[in-house]
Amino acid sequence: QKEVEQDPGPLSVPEGAIVSLNCTYSNSAFQYFMWYRQYSRKGPELLMYTYSSGNKEDGRFTAQVDKSSKYISLFIRDSQPSDSATYLCAMSASFGNEKLTFGTGTRLTIIP
Amino acid sequence: SAVISQKPSRDICQRGTSLTIQCQVDSQVTMMFWYRQQPGQSLTLIATANQGSEATYESGFVIDKFPISRPNLTFSTLTVSNMSPEDSSIYLCSDTTSGAMGDTQYFGPGTRLTVL
């Protein structure tokens, strides 16, 4: 069993829809949870990170962590064609100088 | 956050040869990381590179296959040695720098390697 599971998609939604992206994990030591966005032929770009359980909002993006269920989510409101990318969840036991464990990524397409 | 560049951006190589990938950061960073991203798979950490010490390799990766240099606080190289088609992948370096989201990892654009 992989430490981090993420539905690879692909996921296609119409412009303006709310998108929900999810990851589950098995390692209870994970405390820091990150979402990266990766456009085709580019490196991953950090979108958001959260510590422990709870919600964090940044513009149209909301990250949720439920440590009791070992489940994290990223919501995108009012989705735009420019949101079309692969979204990778990543997590670690400590912050900064620490190995990140990634999900496989979900490929998202927003249809105009 | 620091700006990270990688060279080459892509390459096509023959089986049995070696390729050295360069990673340059525009500010001094303590730790740099090398990841591999194979098609349809997660980013997998190959090794952690500290300046002035030997790189620390993850399980399944060995120095003879992936030698790493870290001569200073802004530069690192990863060599993929004696390549086979299974080494075809995107290779990414990252560093931990203080950015808008604190000390977390930021990635370079990647090197897309195809081995024939």
Image: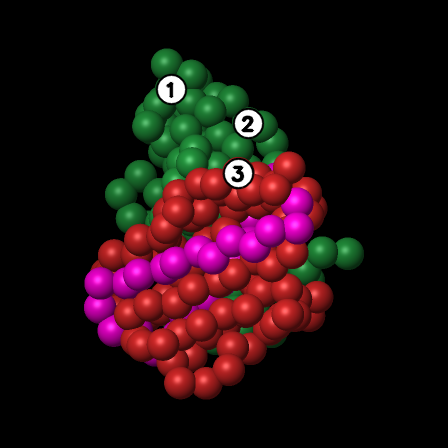
Q: Which chain is home to disc 2?
A: A
* Subunit ID for the residue under disc 1: A
- Residue at 55% across / 27% down in the picture? A11
Say which amino acid is labelled 1.
Answer: Glu
Q: Please determine if labels 2 and 1 lie on a single subunit.
A: yes
- The answer to whether any part of residue A69 appears in the image is no
Q: Quarter of the image holding residue A50?
A: bottom left
Q: CA distance from mark 2 to mark 3?
A: 31 Å
Q: Amino acid at mark 3?
A: Ile
Chain under disc 3: B
Quadrant where the N terminus of chain A sits is bottom right
The residue at which mark 3 appears reads as: B12
**Stretch of the chain drawn in magenta:** B15-41
Report how far apart the C-alphas of labels 2 and 1 lie in the structure. Answer: 13 Å
Circles 2 and 3: CB atoms closer than 8 Å: no
- Percent x, y of residue A5: 66, 50
Residue positioned 50% across, 70% down in the render: B68
SS at circle 2 = strand
* Letter of the green chain: A
Circle 1: is it few (<14), some (14-19), or many (20+) Cα within 10 Å?
Answer: some
Chain B as rendered: colour: red
**Height in image: A77 above or below B94?**
above
Residue B75 in magenta stretch: no
The residue to which callout 2 is attached is A11
Q: Which residue is mark 1?
A: A15
> Residue B91 appears at what percent x and percent y?
50, 51
